[in-house]
Image (cartoon, grey):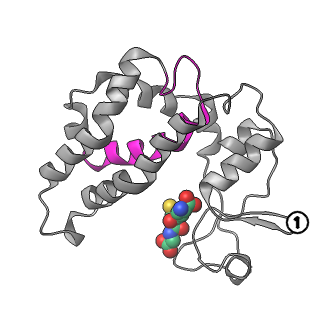
């Protein structure tokens, strides 16, 4: 989404995670997606790709924000919330955990603080969309999709409104197209 927003054209190479192309592993041996390759520069962390894209162009000021507030949200999202998301998504791998208890922890840690922020303003950091909204909503989307009926019943109306807005945005729609698998 950041690449598209910044107006950067890329050659999109869709891969199968169970059949990673050698050319990808050569430039990024850790074997995760996404990977962005620009001549000699290889970026294989989503956040680095976002940062790079927004350095090239940031037409609506997605980066005009307080960095320390952004960092706090991102660290919580990518750290403890990601752990809870995996526990909630894959209950078979965490048989000792009760899904409702995991859900409750996720609410306390992430979803209720987001609800508080989004009750006060349309976006996480205020009245304008920023890169933090874009970086965080995919995990909230994943979380909501584990058990949509359960998510619908949660007392987080502002988070649901914000998530729906992100999912219905033209930008999201424009990047969620199916691509054929690329082969070496
Ligand atoms: N911190 C990395 C995480 C990347 C990551 O774990 N991607 C997953 C897919 S969403 C992946 O490629 N997993 C490798 C695999 O399943 O083999 C980033 O943000 O780019």
Dominant secondary structure (helix, strand or loop) of the stretch shown in magenta: helix
Span highlighted in magenta in the image: 123-148
The residue under the point 51% across, 78% down is 18
Q: Residue at x 65, y 67 (%)?
A: 181
Q: Residue 175 in magenta?
A: no
**Neighbour tally class for label 1: few under 14, some 14-19, many 20 plus, Cα within 10 Å:** few
Where is residue 125 shown, x and y percent of the image? 51, 26
Image quarter (top left, top right, bottom left or bottom right) of the N terminus: top right
Query: Is residue 141 one of those drawn in magenta?
Result: yes
Picture layout, residue 2 above or below residue 153: below
Q: Nearer the viewer, residue 5 or 20?
A: 5
Residue 5 in the image, given as x and y percentages of width and height: 72, 36
Q: Position of residue 143 (x, y in %)?
A: 33, 47
Q: Horizontally, is 12 left or right of 156 in the view?
A: right
Of residues 29 and 12, which is closer to you in this image? 29
List the residue tagged with mark 1: 39
Q: Residue at x 21, y 27 (%)?
A: 155
Residue 97 drawn at (x, y percent): 14, 62
Q: Please say if 120 is above or below 134.
A: above
Q: Secondary structure at mark 1?
A: loop
């Amino acid at each position: 989404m950041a690449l598209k927003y910044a107006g950067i054209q890329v050659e999109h190479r869709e891969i199968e995670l169970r059949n990673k192309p050698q050319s990808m592993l050569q430039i990024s041996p850790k074997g995760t997606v996404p990977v962005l390759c620009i001549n000699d520069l290889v970026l294989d962390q989503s956040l680095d790709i976002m940062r790079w894209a927004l350095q090239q162009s940031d037409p609506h000021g997605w980066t005009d924000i307080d960095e320390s507030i952004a960092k706090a949200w991102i660290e919580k999202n990518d750290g403890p919330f990601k752990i809870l998301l995996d526990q909630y998504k894959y209950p078979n791998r965490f048989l000792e955990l009760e899904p409702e208890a995991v859900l409750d922890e996720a609410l306390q840690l992430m979803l209720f603080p987001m609800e508080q922020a989004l009750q006060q303003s349309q976006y996480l950091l205020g009245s304008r969309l920023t890169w933090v909204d874009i970086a965080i909503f995919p995990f909230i989307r994943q979380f909501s999709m584990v058990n949509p009926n359960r998510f619908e019943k949660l007392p987080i109306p502002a988070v649901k409104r914000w998530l729906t807005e992100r999912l219905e945005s033209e930008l999201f729609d424009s990047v969620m197209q199916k691509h054929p698998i690329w082969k070496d």
